[in-house]
Image (cartoon, rainbow, N blue to C red):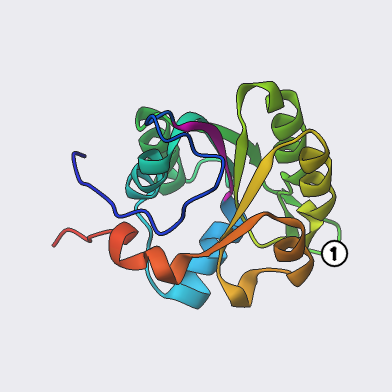
Amino acid sequence: MGEEFPCFCWHKDMVYSGMKRRACIFIDGANFYFVQKDILHQKIDLVKLLNYFRVEFDIYNTFFYLAYREGDEKQENFIKLLAFSGITVVKKPIKQLKDGTYKGDLDVNLTIDALLTKDNYQTAILCTGDGDFERLVWTLRNFGKEIICVSTREATAVELVNACDRYIDLRDLLPLIKLEEKD
Protein backbone atom coordinates (compact mmCIF):
# COMPACT_ATOMS: atom_id res chain seq x y z
CA MET A 1 0.00 0.00 0.00
CA GLY A 2 2.91 2.37 0.53
CA GLU A 3 3.84 2.31 -3.17
CA GLU A 4 4.62 5.58 -4.91
CA PHE A 5 3.09 6.19 -8.30
CA PRO A 6 4.38 8.67 -10.83
CA CYS A 7 1.68 11.13 -11.82
CA PHE A 8 1.27 11.30 -15.60
CA CYS A 9 -1.14 14.19 -15.35
CA TRP A 10 -1.03 17.68 -13.93
CA HIS A 11 -3.65 20.37 -13.92
CA LYS A 12 -3.17 24.15 -13.82
CA ASP A 13 -5.54 24.47 -10.85
CA MET A 14 -3.36 22.36 -8.56
CA VAL A 15 -2.02 24.55 -5.76
CA TYR A 16 1.77 24.72 -5.39
CA SER A 17 1.55 24.55 -1.58
CA GLY A 18 0.88 20.85 -1.83
CA MET A 19 -2.89 21.14 -1.40
CA LYS A 20 -4.63 18.49 -3.44
CA ARG A 21 -7.90 18.94 -5.25
CA ARG A 22 -10.77 16.86 -3.86
CA ALA A 23 -11.98 14.12 -6.19
CA CYS A 24 -14.62 11.43 -6.31
CA ILE A 25 -14.19 8.27 -8.36
CA PHE A 26 -17.16 6.66 -10.10
CA ILE A 27 -16.53 3.18 -11.57
CA ASP A 28 -19.02 1.69 -14.03
CA GLY A 29 -18.49 -1.94 -13.03
CA ALA A 30 -19.93 -3.53 -16.18
CA ASN A 31 -17.92 -1.28 -18.49
CA PHE A 32 -14.78 -1.75 -16.40
CA TYR A 33 -15.18 -5.55 -16.45
CA PHE A 34 -15.59 -5.56 -20.24
CA VAL A 35 -12.44 -3.45 -20.69
CA GLN A 36 -10.37 -5.79 -18.50
CA LYS A 37 -11.71 -9.02 -20.03
CA ASP A 38 -12.06 -8.19 -23.71
CA ILE A 39 -9.61 -5.35 -24.39
CA LEU A 40 -6.77 -5.32 -21.87
CA HIS A 41 -6.84 -9.09 -21.19
CA GLN A 42 -5.58 -8.12 -17.75
CA LYS A 43 -7.24 -7.63 -14.37
CA ILE A 44 -6.82 -4.27 -12.68
CA ASP A 45 -6.07 -3.92 -8.98
CA LEU A 46 -8.63 -1.33 -7.85
CA VAL A 47 -6.63 -0.46 -4.73
CA LYS A 48 -3.62 0.35 -6.93
CA LEU A 49 -5.86 2.43 -9.21
CA LEU A 50 -7.14 4.40 -6.20
CA ASN A 51 -3.60 4.86 -4.91
CA TYR A 52 -2.56 6.20 -8.31
CA PHE A 53 -5.19 8.92 -8.07
CA ARG A 54 -4.35 9.62 -4.40
CA VAL A 55 -0.99 11.00 -5.58
CA GLU A 56 -2.77 13.92 -7.26
CA PHE A 57 -6.08 14.07 -5.38
CA ASP A 58 -7.64 13.91 -1.95
CA ILE A 59 -10.23 11.20 -2.64
CA TYR A 60 -13.61 12.02 -1.11
CA ASN A 61 -15.15 8.64 -2.02
CA THR A 62 -15.01 5.86 -4.57
CA PHE A 63 -18.25 4.37 -5.86
CA PHE A 64 -18.32 1.03 -7.70
CA TYR A 65 -21.56 0.20 -9.56
CA LEU A 66 -22.17 -3.52 -9.89
CA ALA A 67 -24.95 -5.60 -11.41
CA TYR A 68 -24.65 -8.99 -9.74
CA ARG A 69 -26.13 -12.46 -9.86
CA GLU A 70 -27.81 -13.33 -6.58
CA GLY A 71 -26.23 -16.32 -4.90
CA ASP A 72 -22.96 -16.02 -6.86
CA GLU A 73 -20.33 -16.65 -4.18
CA LYS A 74 -17.48 -15.31 -6.31
CA GLN A 75 -19.30 -12.00 -6.80
CA GLU A 76 -20.23 -11.83 -3.10
CA ASN A 77 -16.54 -12.23 -2.22
CA PHE A 78 -15.65 -9.49 -4.72
CA ILE A 79 -18.25 -7.17 -3.15
CA LYS A 80 -16.77 -7.83 0.30
CA LEU A 81 -13.25 -7.17 -1.00
CA LEU A 82 -14.33 -3.83 -2.44
CA ALA A 83 -16.20 -2.81 0.72
CA PHE A 84 -13.29 -3.71 3.00
CA SER A 85 -10.99 -1.73 0.69
CA GLY A 86 -12.99 1.42 1.41
CA ILE A 87 -14.99 1.40 -1.82
CA THR A 88 -18.71 2.15 -1.69
CA VAL A 89 -20.46 -0.63 -3.61
CA VAL A 90 -23.76 0.25 -5.25
CA LYS A 91 -25.28 -3.01 -6.41
CA LYS A 92 -28.39 -4.20 -8.16
CA PRO A 93 -29.39 -7.77 -9.01
CA ILE A 94 -29.32 -8.69 -12.68
CA LYS A 95 -32.80 -9.17 -14.12
CA GLN A 96 -33.73 -11.52 -16.94
CA LEU A 97 -35.89 -9.87 -19.57
CA LYS A 98 -38.75 -11.56 -21.47
CA ASP A 99 -36.50 -12.07 -24.51
CA GLY A 100 -34.02 -14.06 -22.40
CA THR A 101 -31.38 -11.34 -22.18
CA TYR A 102 -30.09 -9.95 -18.90
CA LYS A 103 -30.04 -6.36 -17.66
CA GLY A 104 -28.45 -4.76 -14.64
CA ASP A 105 -28.22 -1.13 -15.66
CA LEU A 106 -26.84 1.23 -12.99
CA ASP A 107 -26.23 4.32 -15.15
CA VAL A 108 -29.02 6.24 -13.42
CA ASN A 109 -27.59 5.37 -9.98
CA LEU A 110 -24.14 6.64 -10.99
CA THR A 111 -25.63 9.83 -12.42
CA ILE A 112 -27.72 10.57 -9.33
CA ASP A 113 -24.78 9.89 -6.98
CA ALA A 114 -22.49 12.15 -9.02
CA LEU A 115 -25.03 14.98 -8.82
CA LEU A 116 -26.01 14.49 -5.17
CA THR A 117 -22.38 14.46 -3.99
CA LYS A 118 -21.11 17.25 -6.30
CA ASP A 119 -20.56 19.67 -3.41
CA ASN A 120 -18.03 17.24 -1.88
CA TYR A 121 -15.52 17.23 -4.75
CA GLN A 122 -13.89 19.43 -7.39
CA THR A 123 -12.98 16.64 -9.80
CA ALA A 124 -15.07 13.66 -10.91
CA ILE A 125 -13.09 10.68 -12.18
CA LEU A 126 -15.36 8.58 -14.39
CA CYS A 127 -14.06 5.07 -15.01
CA THR A 128 -16.22 4.28 -18.01
CA GLY A 129 -16.32 4.76 -21.73
CA ASP A 130 -20.10 4.79 -21.95
CA GLY A 131 -21.33 7.68 -24.08
CA ASP A 132 -24.57 7.74 -22.09
CA PHE A 133 -22.67 9.75 -19.47
CA GLU A 134 -21.99 12.65 -21.85
CA ARG A 135 -24.95 14.68 -20.52
CA LEU A 136 -23.83 14.06 -16.92
CA VAL A 137 -20.37 15.35 -17.80
CA TRP A 138 -21.74 18.55 -19.35
CA THR A 139 -23.99 19.06 -16.32
CA LEU A 140 -21.12 18.63 -13.84
CA ARG A 141 -18.96 20.98 -15.90
CA ASN A 142 -21.74 23.57 -15.66
CA PHE A 143 -21.29 23.28 -11.88
CA GLY A 144 -17.57 24.02 -12.33
CA LYS A 145 -16.33 20.45 -11.93
CA GLU A 146 -13.31 19.03 -13.70
CA ILE A 147 -14.09 15.66 -15.30
CA ILE A 148 -11.55 12.95 -16.05
CA CYS A 149 -12.52 9.95 -18.19
CA VAL A 150 -10.58 6.73 -17.55
CA SER A 151 -10.99 3.85 -20.00
CA THR A 152 -9.50 2.59 -23.27
CA ARG A 153 -9.85 4.08 -26.74
CA GLU A 154 -11.68 1.00 -28.04
CA ALA A 155 -14.28 1.17 -25.27
CA THR A 156 -14.80 4.92 -25.05
CA ALA A 157 -17.34 6.97 -26.97
CA VAL A 158 -15.73 9.94 -28.69
CA GLU A 159 -18.59 12.11 -27.39
CA LEU A 160 -17.57 11.29 -23.81
CA VAL A 161 -13.92 12.10 -24.45
CA ASN A 162 -14.94 15.36 -26.10
CA ALA A 163 -17.08 16.35 -23.10
CA CYS A 164 -14.44 15.56 -20.46
CA ASP A 165 -11.57 17.84 -19.42
CA ARG A 166 -9.04 15.02 -19.52
CA TYR A 167 -8.82 11.47 -20.79
CA ILE A 168 -6.55 8.80 -19.32
CA ASP A 169 -6.07 5.54 -21.19
CA LEU A 170 -5.88 2.55 -18.86
CA ARG A 171 -3.13 1.08 -21.07
CA ASP A 172 -0.84 3.90 -19.94
CA LEU A 173 -1.50 3.02 -16.29
CA LEU A 174 -1.44 -0.76 -16.68
CA PRO A 175 2.18 -1.25 -15.51
CA LEU A 176 1.21 0.50 -12.27
CA ILE A 177 -2.24 -0.91 -11.63
CA LYS A 178 -2.37 -4.46 -12.96
CA LEU A 179 -3.45 -7.14 -10.53
CA GLU A 180 -0.64 -9.48 -9.61
CA GLU A 181 -2.20 -12.93 -9.62
CA LYS A 182 -1.19 -15.17 -6.73
CA ASP A 183 0.06 -18.61 -7.66
User: From the viewer's perspective, is residue 73 above or below residue 86?
Assistant: below
Q: Nearer the viewer, residue 31 or 1?
A: 1
User: From the viewer's perspective, is residue 122 above or below residue 173?
Assistant: above
Instruction: Identify which residue is drawn at 60% across, 38% down.
Output: 123
Instruction: Identify which residue is drawn at 66% across, 38% down.
Output: 92
- Residue 101 seen by the camera: no
Q: Nearer the viewer, residue 95 or 88?
A: 88
Q: Nearer the viewer, residue 45 or 83?
A: 45
Query: Residue lying furthest front in this view?
Result: 16
Residue 176: percent from the left, percent from the top?
29, 60
Residue 88: percent from the left, percent from the top?
51, 30
- Residue 74 seen by the camera: yes
Residue 95: percent from the left, percent from the top?
73, 48
Instruction: Identify which residue is drawn at 39% across, 29% down.
Output: 17
Q: Nearer the viewer, residue 29 or 24?
A: 24
Query: Residue lying furthest left in this view?
Result: 183
Q: Secondary structure at mark 1?
A: loop
Decide whether residue 26 is among the magenta residues. Answer: yes
Left or right, 20 with reference to 157 = left
| Residue type highlighted by circle 1 | Asp
Residue 161: percent from the left, percent from the top?
70, 64
Q: Quadrant of residue 125?
A: top right
User: From the viewer's perspective, is residue 99 above or below residue 84?
Assistant: below
Q: Quadrant of residue 73?
A: top left
Q: In which quadrant will I find the N terminus?
A: top left
Which residues make up the magenta segment? 20-28
Instruction: Identify which residue is drawn at 55% across, 70% down.
Output: 152
Decide whether residue 40 is among the magenta residues. Answer: no
Q: In which quadrant will I find the C terminus?
A: bottom left
Few, some or many residues within 10 Å of mark 1 (<14, 14–19, 20+)? few
Q: Which residue is denoted by mark 1 in the rendering?
A: 99
